Amino acid sequence: MLILEKLLEIQEIATLPSVTAKILQQIEDDNVDIRNVAQTIETDAPLTAKVLKVANSAIYGLRTPVASISQAIITIGLNRLANIVIGVSIFSRFMIKGQSQVKQLMEKFWMHSASTGIISKALLGKVGRNFRELEFVGGLLHDFGKLILMQYKLSDYLKVIDMITNNVVLDVEAEKSIFGVDHLEVGYFIAQRWKLPPQIINTIGYHSKLNRLKEDNVLASVVRFADLLCEIWGADFFEGQRIIKFEEEQSWKNLVEHFPELSNMDIEKFTFELEEDFKKSREFLKIVSSE
């Protein structure tokens, strides 16, 4: 589609941050040397500082603080730390701080994204599982296509929001009407160009179209269910959902199938317990938005 090709003319969108791209290449090697990965991350001093702050934050609750990237890799694990780096670097790069008229909109977007990442992590914690932080990064980036569309033409995305707010339409329908593509297609396209991990690519591209996804369905379902929870808990971002019946949601059906113990989960109690996790979302945003 024409708009997807036009996105590649925007340098900031067309290329993944260089350090992140190099790390993705390094961790593909089964014989990767963690010292080389640490050195790559440390070439970007601001990124290093943010990654260490995130690793030492309440999000991870490490018993012993880590003081270096090498120590963080040993404590958290190479793949988990690499995924944290992906999330932090992309988030930091696209933080929009200018334009006072859209500041509130951006804050709402970032809060929804961070909250979805945190809740995805908390949800898997309920069953004693993790996907090496892919659930966290998938949550952070699941609506990444919306950010791209806003950066491409904010005035048109404001029309999308107006349609969602004043008409009974979902975000993907409004986006198709205005842009000819939806945020899942845009996010999937850019994530592929960046060669992000396939699990993240699929989560970005299919989290609200789970019936079309054959691989990584569990991860995408975790992110989607967290996404819906955020929609009803006040950390939403214009999806257009008016009523959500969780027992009818495909994401919930998929999760219960894979984790039967969730069928007994008290959603109201879970909501209460997640108050602290929402605070972690704000902490994450504060870290990645710092200079």
Image: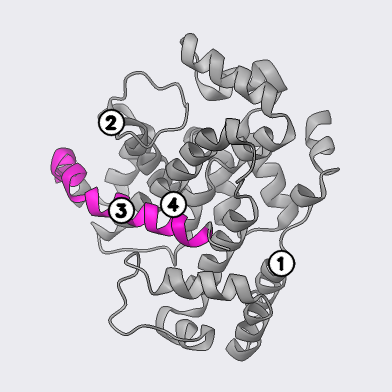
Do the residues under discs 4 and 1 have CB atoms within 8 angstroms?
no
- Mark 4 vs mark 1: give the one in front: 1
Residue flagged by tag 1: what amino acid is it? Ala
Residue at the spot 60% in from the left edge and 70% down from the top edge:
47
Q: Which image quarter: residue 266?
A: top left
Disc 2 crowd rating (10 Å Cα; few below 14, some 14-19, many 20+) is: some
Residue flagged by tag 2: what amino acid is it? Phe
Which span is picked out in magenta? 263-288
Residue 212 visible in rendering:
no
Disc 4 crowd rating (10 Å Cα; few below 14, some 14-19, many 20+) is: many
- Mark 1 vs mark 2: give the one in front: 1
**Residue named by callout 4:** 219
Q: Which mark is drawn over residue 246?
A: 2
Tell whether position 282 is magenta.
yes
Query: Cα distance, mark 4 to mark 2?
Result: 17 Å
Residue 60 visible in rendering:
yes
Tell whether position 185 is magenta.
no
Secondary element at tag 1: helix
**Residue named by callout 3:** 279
